Amino acid sequence: MIGETQMSSELSGNQQTRTRANFGMKLGPMAMVVLSVLQGSPAMAETLNVWFGTTTPRGGVSEGIYHATFDTESGKLSPATLAVKAQQPGFLAMHPSKPVLYASSGSGVTAYRVQAESKDAKLVEMGSVESGDGGVAHLATDRTGSVLLSAQYGGGSTTLYELAEDGSVARRVEVHEHDDLLSPAGSGVVGNRQNAPHAHWVGTSPDNRFAFTPDLGMDKVVIWKLDPESPALSHHGFGEGIPGGGPRHMKFSPDGKRIYLLNELTLSVTVFDYDAETGTMTAGQTIPALSEETKAKERFNSSSEIRVHPSGKFVYSANRGHDSISVFRVDEAGQLELIEVEAIRGGWPRNFNLDPSGRWLIAAGRDSHTATVFEVDGDTGELTFTRQTQQVPTPICVLFSK
């Protein structure tokens, strides 16, 4: 179905001007403001920064973190250029209020001052701190920008860091080994993947009182009590995943009442009810991202990333191997319904992201060295490939910033 924005884009410039003028005469100034918002007019358009974290294997083509710009009116993604040379800057995060970007850097974390307008140095290093337990798989700040957290896959741990006033990483505060929480800690359901803890993601609750680390090896989400002032992190409990699911990443619904947990090994999503007061999560529905028949046609499949639309009406997950994005509709009871599986037009979607408006989605194809752009239908949540593709060396993280 062609929406108003699409129809408007097919008119000539003069036709669009006359049409808007006629509408303005009939509807008045206030109605024009509302119409502009609905149509995504140039008055509401933004140019966003897009940062790409990459993998930098020996002999590979990537040199570090890459930068592009994105026009939210046209959906045009600019060519990507090297922002800073770095080793293994896989996952990225922005400070919530300062122009500071954080990147995993092999066995630690690195902070960069953002100079997006600079032609020479878009990112300037502010220092690095070791994780204390090997390679960092994921990192995130808390909601206030007081602390940084990282998840170590190989080490199976969560690390807390204190941030300085300027946003740099002041020090590593503590490392929590997931092995210390249970014995045995690995679920053992999938022998070659779940014999030990493998922390894969970290983030905080909307009220900033708790932190969460999905652990693929444990089939659990480790829940921490977070004190960003001290700062300190203490074990609070677990969210129970499905046996053999392999929890990878998770996201909250916009209202904070639900958690969507992505299961890497079974390519499925588990929906949890979340009690904000007690910091507990209760599992409900689990729904596959791909059918068994579809998975059987691939030699290997695994889930990589999950995102929630800003409206809360849709959830998206990425499927490596099948190289696609699964689209789910959220009903009034919070249940998911699979409505579409869309090819990314690239290889191995390690990551993807929605722009802040929820109108656009950029998918990163690690093996195809591509970033592809899709338009999101605001009514149905379905994706339409815009034929916008840019080359990015081995991208594994997509991050928007203003």
Image (tube, rainbow, N blue to C red):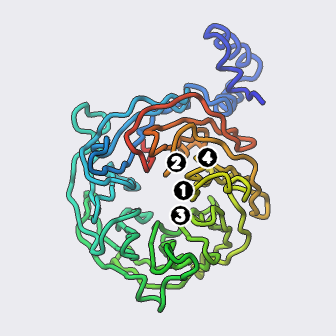
Asked if the residue at tag 1 contacts the one at tag 2, i.e. Cβ–Cβ closer than 8 Å, the answer is yes
- Residue at the location (56% across, 31% down)? 44
Q: Amino acid at mark 4?
A: Ser
Instruction: Determine whether label 3 and label 2 are within 8 Å by CB.
Output: no
The image quarter in which residue 164 lies? bottom left
Which residue is at the front of the view, 49 or 387?
Answer: 387
The amino acid at mark 1 is Glu
Dot label at residue 324: 4
Mark nearest the camera among 2 and 1 is 2
Q: Position of residue 16 (x, y in %)?
A: 66, 14
Q: Is residue 180 visible?
A: yes
Which tag, 4 or 2, sits closer to the chain's start? 4
Kindly report the distance in space between the C-alpha atoms of the residues bearing marks 4 and 2: 7 Å
In the picture, measured across the screen, residue 278 lies left or right of residue 150, that is: right
Check if mark 4's residue and mark 2's residue have beta carbons within 8 Å: yes
The answer to whether residue 332 is left or right of residue 103 is: right
Mark 3 and mark 2: Cα distance apart in space = 14 Å
Among numbered discs 3 and 1, the one appearing first in the sequence: 3
Q: In the displayed structure, does residue 337 sit left or right of residue 247?
A: right
Residue on which the image places disc 2: 349
> Residue at point 48% right, 38% down?
371
Q: In the image, is residue 198 above or below residue 26?
A: below
Q: Amino acid at mark 2?
A: Pro
The reply to whether discs 3 and 1 touch (Cβ–Cβ < 8 Å) is yes
